[in-house]
Image: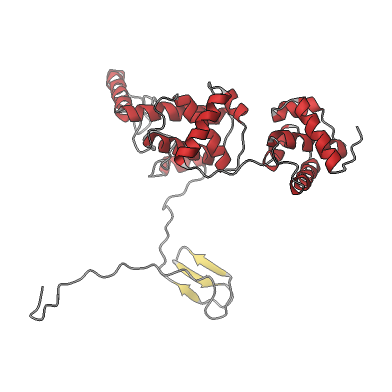
Amino acid sequence: MATDDGTDNAPRAPPPRQEAAVPTRCSNCSSTHLTRDYERGELVCDECGLVLEEAMIDQGPEWRAFDAEQGEKRARTGAPTTLTIHDKGLSTEIGWKNKDPYGKSIPTRNRAQLYRLRKWQRRIRVSNATERNLAFALAELDRIASSMALPRNVRETAAMIYRRAVARNLIRGRSIEGVVAASLYGSCRQCNVPRTLDEIAGKSRIGRKEIGRTYRFMTRELKLKLMPTRPQDYIQRFCSELKLKGEVQTRANEILKEATERELTSGRGPTGVAAAAIYISSVQCGERRTQREVAEVAGVTEVTIRNRYKELTEKLNLRVIL
């Protein structure tokens, strides 16, 4: 309500209450040994017994679960949102178990109705061409990522890159599988989980050249900031697949560090240099692997390993007794 002098005396909403930070040190004896008493809702110092906080609110659930199955049954929330599903996991889904919420079997006379509900639910979830495109593409992305055992963060990043490509209309005139494979390759680079184009091409139905061409186009249009892969990024995975000990991996990293300082890795394929360093370190550490074994794991030819091997041993003065 406005007064004669033009000021507004209308009641104002109180400012939002800010939660006070929970103390981490006792104000009496400066001890850091504090204990939460959940029965009384208090924060007590173990040294002097001073009650620092009282009437605290427990933000956790009021129920207990003794295994993962009980936790899933009693939880009141669904799965978190994810970019790997076309609707981000926000829509509901009618399960294929013919049971009601209490776990009892649904009568036979009602199963036809439930079947129709499932069918219409699937149709409603994918309502337009964009959602159909995303549904097919993200299913293909999940298939390739699962076959390559890629972690969750790589899948989420790949889904985000593909969604950006769809928003920019970059998939017009290109195959969905090619854009998916290129997005997955770019996400591996971004998340420091390097995979070669040959590995991704082997799991997808698209050739290496098309994946590389699409990847370069998407990198330019979406302005993806990707650092070139280094030979060090492949050492751990290759050594693990060859079942080599940690000292072989450490020695291979030392060789690559010295080679990088002398600029011997520039202009060479990172997988070939990494394979040659692993071959040298395996011989030096007494756990020799043949060039063919290393080449099969690294996805390069034996000729490449021999060429990189000669360069490293000559330029770094490495002594290798074959």
Position in image of residue 96 (x %, y %): 39, 24
Asked if one can make out residue 57 in the rendered structure from this viewpoint, the answer is yes
User: Height in image: 102 above or below 175?
Assistant: below
Position in image of residue 50 (x %, y %): 51, 77
- Residue at point 14%, 77% (across, down): 7
> Which residue is more in the foreground, 299 or 132?
299
The residue most toward the right is 321
Based on the displayed image, in which of its 4 quarters is residue 275 positioned? top right
Position in image of residue 158 (x %, y %): 49, 37
Q: Is residue 277 left or right of residue 100?
A: right
> Which residue is more in the foreground, 70 or 132?
132
Q: Is residue 121 left or right of residue 66?
A: left
Position in image of residue 135 (x %, y %): 39, 28
Quadrant (top left, top right, bottom left, bottom right) of the C terminus: top right
- Residue at point 45%, 63% (across, down): 39
> Which residue is more in the foreground, 93 or 159?
159
Asked if one can make out residue 281 in the rendered structure from this viewpoint, the answer is no
User: Height in image: 310 above or below 116?
Assistant: below
Q: How many marks?
A: 0
- Residue at point 30%, 25% (across, down): 123
Based on the displayed image, in which of its 4 quarters is residue 291 positioned? top right
Quadrant (top left, top right, bottom left, bottom right) of the N terminus: bottom left
User: Height in image: 59 above or below 259?
Assistant: below
Q: What's the coloring here? A: secondary structure
The residue most toward the left is 4
